[in-house]
């Protein structure tokens, strides 16, 4: 695929013209995707059986449920008990995160630190998206979204899945673009999608949608992957898609403002300039970027603890003692 410079950041590459390889996905990730697709029917037994098929996931889930972060007083040694305590939908979301970490095994070499930063950003965005649901005050909206809380978490976790695809297909170019910022002095457009079009011939939302369709991701996750930068362009698939996209977009910018950026740092002012800000603020108790900062900064240490807890599996259990690089300042 040869890069062809777009006329602007919103240039669209026909999905049929893409030729991208998808990394091999762990079977447990595919199982978790299928279960998440119907959260209302998600029960303890099928989630327990899914987890028990993967010894690494069993070990990590028990480590998570017994961690200080969750504050459970009695030690939990049963997978089924862990699923009951955390909730089957929540566990399915955690399993998605665990299996994203496993993808690092196919991204060894120069792209590995780049991938680690991307995972940290994704974990932070997912937690913030889940937290921001509690700020929604529009009549009935929070009540409608609460049963889908962990589906929203998984969607936020995967919002930048297209960048994983680009890093997997073009590791050297991705390192130059995302980590070394090789084009910063040559391109004035601040939208990363424009620079991705120049570098790869498609941007990460297009690459993500292509891969999500190829891998049969649930439709909600596919729409989030494709439209998290431009929620207004999302199809009328579900009346709750727009507020979900708005929350994830704001969480994406907030994670950057809190130091969990990928390829670029962020600011609270940029949160207010996000495409989704107006729609989010109209339905939230948080009505200004300053209010968002005041809400989230006091819990920055908790966010750090959460991201460290959720990504430790990547370092300690899959890749040895390698220290993760962080964009935090």
Image (cartoon, rainbow, N blue to C red):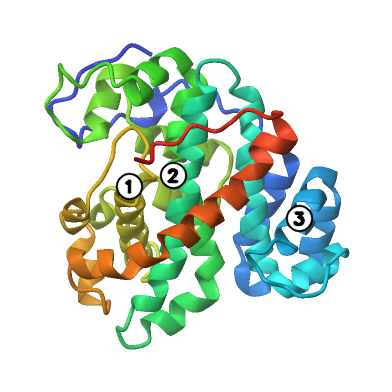
Which of disc 3 and disc 1 is earlier in sequence? 3
Q: SS class of the residue under badge 1?
A: helix
Camera-nearest residue between 178 and 295: 295
Q: In the rendering, at what x and y percent does residue 314 appear? A: 65, 38
**Callout 2: 10 Å neighbours few (<14), some, many (20+)?**
many
**Residue under the point 32% across and 30% down:** 203
The residue singled out by tag 2 in the image is 121
Q: Quadrant of residue 288?
A: bottom left
Q: Which mark is residue 256?
A: 1
**Callout 3: 10 Å neighbours few (<14), some, many (20+)?**
some
Q: Is residue 329 left or right of residue 53?
A: left
- Examine the rendered structure and indicate whether residue 102 appears above or below residue 77: above
**Residue under the point 37% across and 58% down:** 248
Which of disc 2 and disc 3 is earlier in sequence? 3
Q: Which mark is residue 311?
A: none
In space, the residues marked 1 and 3 are separated at their CA atoms by 28 Å
Q: Quadrant of residue 81?
A: bottom right
Q: Quadrant of the C terminus?
A: top left
Q: Which mark is residue 63?
A: 3
- Examine the rendered structure and indicate whether residue 325 appears above or below residue 60: above
Camera-nearest residue between 41 and 134: 134
Camera-nearest residue between 235 and 296: 296
């Amino acid at each position: 695929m040869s890069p062809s410079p777009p006329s602007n950041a919103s240039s669209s590459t026909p999905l049929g013209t893409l030729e991208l390889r998808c990394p091999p996905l762990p079977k447990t990730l595919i199982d978790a995707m299928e279960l998440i697709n119907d959260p209302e029917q998600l029960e303890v037994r099928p989630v327990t059986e899914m987890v028990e098929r993967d010894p690494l996931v069993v070990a990590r889930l028990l480590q998570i449920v017994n961690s200080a972060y969750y504050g459970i007083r009695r030690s939990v040694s049963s997978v089924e008990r862990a699923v009951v305590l955390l909730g089957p939908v929540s566990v399915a979301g955690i399993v998605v995160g665990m299996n994203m970490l496993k993808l690092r095994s196919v991204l060894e070499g120069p792209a590995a630190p780049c991938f680690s930063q991307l995972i940290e950003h994704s974990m932070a965005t997912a937690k913030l998206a889940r937290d921001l649901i509690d700020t929604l005050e529009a009549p009935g909206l929070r009540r409608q979204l609460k049963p889908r809380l962990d589906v929203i978490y998984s969607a936020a976790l995967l919002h930048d899945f297209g960048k994983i695809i680009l890093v997997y297909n073009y590791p050297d170019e991705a390192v130059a673009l995302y980590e070394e910022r090789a084009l910063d002095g040559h391109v004035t457009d601040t939208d990363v999608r424009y620079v991705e079009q120049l570098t790869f011939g498609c941007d990460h939302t297009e690459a993500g949608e292509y891969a999500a369709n190829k891998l049969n991701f649930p439709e909600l996750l596919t729409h989030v992957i494709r439209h998290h930068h431009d929620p207004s362009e999302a199809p009328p698939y579900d009346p709750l898609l727009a507020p979900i996209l708005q929350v994830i977009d704001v969480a994406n910018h907030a994670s950057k403002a809190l130091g969990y950026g990928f390829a670029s740092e962020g600011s609270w002012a940029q949160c207010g300039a996000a495409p989704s800000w107006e729609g989010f603020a109209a339905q939230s108790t948080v009505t200004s970027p300053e209010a968002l900062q005041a809400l989230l900064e006091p819990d920055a240490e908790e966010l750090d603890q959460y991201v460290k807890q959720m990504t430790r599996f990547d370092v300690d259990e899959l890749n040895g003692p390698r220290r993760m690089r962080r964009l935090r300042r």
